[in-house]
Each structure stands twice: as C-alpha cells, then as structure tokens.
Image (cartoon, helix red, strand yellow):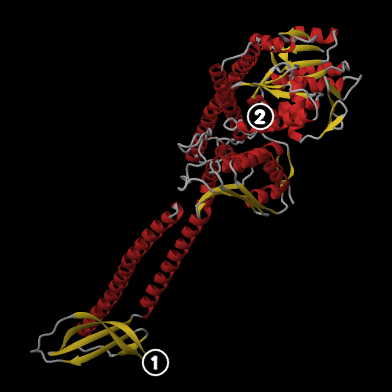
Amino acid sequence: MKLSAKYNRVTLIASIIVFVFTGVIYYSVIHYILTDQLDRDLEIEEDEIVAYVQTNGKLPQAGSFKEQKVSYHLIDPERDFERRYFYNDYFNESAQKIEPGRSLISTVKVSGKLYSVTVTKSRVESEDLVRIIVLITLSVTILLLITLLLINRFILNNIWKPFYGILLQMKAFNLADKNDIRIESTKIDEFAELNTAVATMSLRVKQDYRELKSFTDNASHEMMTPLAVINSKLDTLIQTETFSDSQGELIEDIYVAVGKLSRLNQTLLMLAKIENNLIADQEMIPLDNLIRQKTRQFQELLQLHNINLRTDLAHKQINMNKHLADMLINNLLSNAIRHNYKDGQIFIQLNDSQLIVSNTGLDTALIADKVFERFYKNTASEGMGLGLAISNQICNLYHFKLNYAYQNSQHIFTVSFLEGELQSYSKFGV
Amino acid sequence: MKILLIEDESSLRESIITYFTDEGNICETAADYKSAIEKVNIYNYDCILLDLTLPGGDGMEILRAIKKINKKDGVLIISARHSLDDKLDGLNLGADDYLVKPFHLSELKARVTAIVRRKSYNGSNIITFNEIHIDTQAMSVKIGDNVLILTRKEYDLLVYFIANHSKVTTKSAIAEHLWGDEIDLSDHFDFIYTHIKNLRKKLVEAGCKDYIKSMYGVGYKFENV
C-alpha cells in the first residue's frame, strides 16, 4: 500500500468518526436548548393563566392563536394528576394543518373545581432550525472531507515527487554507468537529506568501484610486459641448441602456460573495457557472413573432433562493434566445440530476432544461474571460464539477452536481439 | 634490413635484437622517448618497432613525428595496450601494423619482413629462398619453374617459415599465426602437424629440397640443407 493511500485512509476514517461523534453531540445539545426554550415559554403561559385565574376568578378563554393552543378540561380532583411536559401533534387552526408541538399539562383550581390546562406550542420553527443547523453542519463536514482528500491527492503527491524522482534514479542506478545520481531540488528537509545521502553514497560506491577496476586494469597491464619477456626469452632459448625430447616437452608446457596466462590477462582487460563502456565504433555487421567466416576458421577443430556442424542462417544485419561481434561468435562457437564430444553435433540458427547455438555435450544441464559467472566452469572443462562471462557482458552492452537452456540433451545458448535493437533504434530516432 | 627498436624493457630489447641480428640485419635500439626521437630524425630505417609506453613520452608522439617529416620508414607498433582505440589510432596515424605483447619473436619477424617487403621499391613482391619463388601479389608459388598449388594455410605457413628461416618456430606461434590469437588452440596443436605434413609433401613432390625440420616437442625449423 502506498504511503499516501495509507495516510488517506487513516485520516479519512478518523475524521469521519470525529465528525459523526461531534455531529451527534451537536444535534443533541441544540435540540436540548431549543426544547428548554419551548418549555420556558410554556411555563410563562401557565403562569399567565394562573395569574388570570387569581385576579378574575375564572379561566381565560380557551383557543388557539398564532403558534399556540390552550384548552381546559374538568377533572376529577380525587385522581392523581401530575404536571408534565410532552411532545404531541396538534391541529394548528391558523395554518389549518396538523403540526408537531410541545405541550405542558398542568392543573388550575377555579372556584373549587379542578381543571387541567393544556398549553401547546408549535415545534415547527425549532424543528426547522435544527434541520438547517444539521444541514449546514453536514455540508461543512462533506466539504471538509473532500478538501482533505484533494489535499492528500494533489499536495501530497506533489510533496512526494522528489522522493519518487530519487527512487527512480536509484532503481536505474548502474555501477558501470557514467552518469551519476542527480540531486532533485526540494524544499523539504527530509527529502533534501535523503537526496544528498543517496548521491554521496552512489559517488562513494562508484569511486570504490572505479578504483577496483583501475587496479585490475593496471595489474593486467603490468603483467603483460613480464609475460612478453618470458615469451621472448623462451623464443630465444629454443634457438640456442638442440634439446632432448624431455626438455622439449618442458619448454612446450611453459609455452602453453604462458599463452594461457596472457590470454587470461587480455580477457580480463577486455571485460573491464566492456564493463566500463569504453567500446565505441559501432557498425552494421552482416552476422550471417561473420558466422560463415568463423565456421570456416574453426573447420580444422571441427574435423579433429569429427563434429557435424549444421547451420540455418537468414540474412541479418546487426549494429555493434566489429571486434566484439567477432568475439561473441568466437566464444559461442569455441564453447560449443570445446564442450562437445567426438562425433557430436552443433547447430547454429540465425533469424531476425535470435541467434541460437546448440550443441551436444555433457549429459547434465549446466547450472543456468552460474553459467555466465566469471571463472565458473565444469570440472572437466579446460577453459578459463571467462568465455561465457565475456559473451554475456557483450550482450549486456548491446541490451541483447543471452540465455542458456538444456533440452533434448542439447545445450542451447540463445542471443535475443529484439530489445537491444529497439533501444538502438529509439536512440537514433528511427 | 635496418631496424630501430624503441622499447624500454631491456630484457625484451635484448631478446628481439638477438633474434633479428644475423644475416646482415642491422639493429639499433632506443630505450626512451628522447633518444628515439633523435634517432628517428637523423637516420632512416626499413622498419621501426615502436613501443607505446615509454619513459619520457608517448610512443604515439614518435609516430606522429615520423609521419610529420614524411619519412617512409615502416612502423610496427608493439604494445601491451590491447585497446582497440590504440590500435585504430596507431593504424590511422600511419603505422603499418600493430602487435600486442606478449608475442612470439617469430611472429614479429614475419610481420617486420612483410612490412619491409611492402615498403621496398626494388624487387618488391617476390620472396626467394633458393629454388622457392613466391609472388606475394599473385600469391603464387614456384619451385624452379614448376608452379605449386597451395591452400591458403599452406601458403601462409610457407611465407612464415621463410621469414623465420634458420629459426625454431614453436607450434603455438604457428597456430596463432594461422588461426589468429582469438581462438585458443593450445590443446590442439596436433592438427598443425597435418598442414605441415601436407606442405612438406607438396614441396618435395614439386622438386624442392626438404627444408622443414621437426624439433621434437618444441616446434619446427625451416633451414637450408
């Protein structure tokens, strides 16, 4: 639940309760005051009748005038009679209709006879008054509630805008991205504080990340020169004299190890480069041609393992860096060969939206979440475990999607272009 | 040929010089930016091997200086910077080739030989080794007067061998030369053997002497017999 919705609900419920409660009290108090006023009027009337009887020795004339009606009845003096106020309806002769009234019944003694006196006053006016007051109160209440809702909806949303702004930026935050988190201007202290906290945090994180990156970069660079020295010294060494067979094997092993080390180094440098988004120079690359060229390049390897390669290539142009496209196809293809068995199969399918490389290989599926992690490799694998990581990194750079699946004893790697192409089209306004 | 090696790492410099200094090659060296600029300005070379990270300045500036004074010297950049930008910058500035450290000396030799061949005015596109004549323009090979039909890989291999004649070349160097260093072939050097066997057979059948010598474990040597 959104904070504003929660807040809205609480304030709404609380104000409705308060308004109903105060409304009830308000109504009862007003009602009580008005009834009290009526009763006092009735008492005055009673006093006047009593005074009249005392001076004149007879009852004043019964009858109804204006909003008031007086009537007398002879009653049995033995009977217990109580003076009381009560509500009743009476016939208003001037208005010629039945109206609600408030009556006082009392007794008066005229020349030894006991009479009951009923004085009735119309309640219409006070009822009207109560109705108007209730109506006004109700409309004020409704108006207040509506205003409250509107304030919550518009003002609160407005107030929270910087919060959502910063949230959006945090969601889109990418360590490898160049752009930092912008500080949204706000007059609200809490949000200003949040903004600066987030901005400083992101800066600090990026700084640490950059340092780590440049460390990897420098370390790999610095390793290249000694590697070059080892390689050249070996090249010089083998020129000096003839070696025995076992010496030759030793030297070959050293060559292989040095070769692996330098390849590893170069791959790490490449990864850092891609992650830092330092690869520019995009061009339209005919992917089908590139794949054909690569399969020719891998011909000998395929023959060596007697692997049957089938392709189904539609013409497909793709906008990316030539070297990276090369590397991506290289990695996928050498992966499919490396993890294959003798007399195995490779199938490469290219259409407008996808490139699918499937190969036979191990009987068990690889762990899909880990396949693209650096240095993840099967125990049987002789590779460095960087090929797929770099492929994934290349795909990420162009917003392609690289997926792994294991189906019908085929390891299937799929590159989906769609999203990446949409993004690049929108970028160029096509 | 006359070569200038601009490289600050002394042991690497030594190895390269040793590899190049024979059969009349003249090798000069410069270890820093200043001496490199001096030598480049005064002398002419067939090929300049240029490291990009030098004490005292950027190797790229030396390349600019060479091009500014309109020198025809061939330039091969050797650098630990595997960055594509550097490669493109270097080639755009007029370098003839770009080799990333670490490299095999045999690969360096092959590239330098190719640059020098392209740059030289006299004679040009013909490589001759005893009875072997290669026209690099037409990519055709003759043994004496017999035309020899080779596959692309066999042709590359032969040119590579001749550039590195009398030197032991390793299997990994050959593999990298023929298939590029993007493909990790380190576990499958064996199929290089097939190509070499075929080349050898074709050469001998065309009446060529058997120059290719196998050095067990290490590699091969193309040598005058």
Instruction: Indicate whether A302 appears above or below A37.
Output: above
> How many neighbours does mark 2 have within 10 angstroms: few (below 14), some (14-19), or many (20 or more)?
many
Q: Residue furthest right?
A: B122
Dividing the picture into quadrants, the one containing residue A118 is bottom left
Dividing the picture into quadrants, the one containing residue B148 is top right
Residue A148 in percent (x, y) is at 46, 58
Front in this rendered view, residue B152 or A418 = B152
The numbered disc on residue B82 is none
Q: Which residue is mark 2?
A: B175
Instruction: Indicate whether A85 appears above or below B105.
Output: below
On screen, residue A321 versus residue A42, left or right, reads right
Query: Which amino acid is tagged 1?
Result: Gln
Residue B171 in percent (x, y) is at 64, 25
Could you tell me which secondary element the residue under label 2 belongs to? helix
Res. A270 in view: yes
Badge 2 sits on which subunit? B
Badge 1 sits on which subunit? A
Query: Which amino acid is tagged 2?
Result: Ala
Res. A414 in view: no
> How many neighbours does mark 1 have within 10 angstroms: few (below 14), some (14-19), or many (20 or more)?
few
On screen, residue A399 versus residue A93, left or right, reads right
The numbered disc on residue A96 is 1
Question: Residue at horizontal 77%, vertical 9%?
Answer: B27
Q: CA distance from mark 2 to mark 1?
A: 122 Å
Q: Residue furthest left?
A: A78
Could you tell me which secondary element the residue under label 1 belongs to? loop
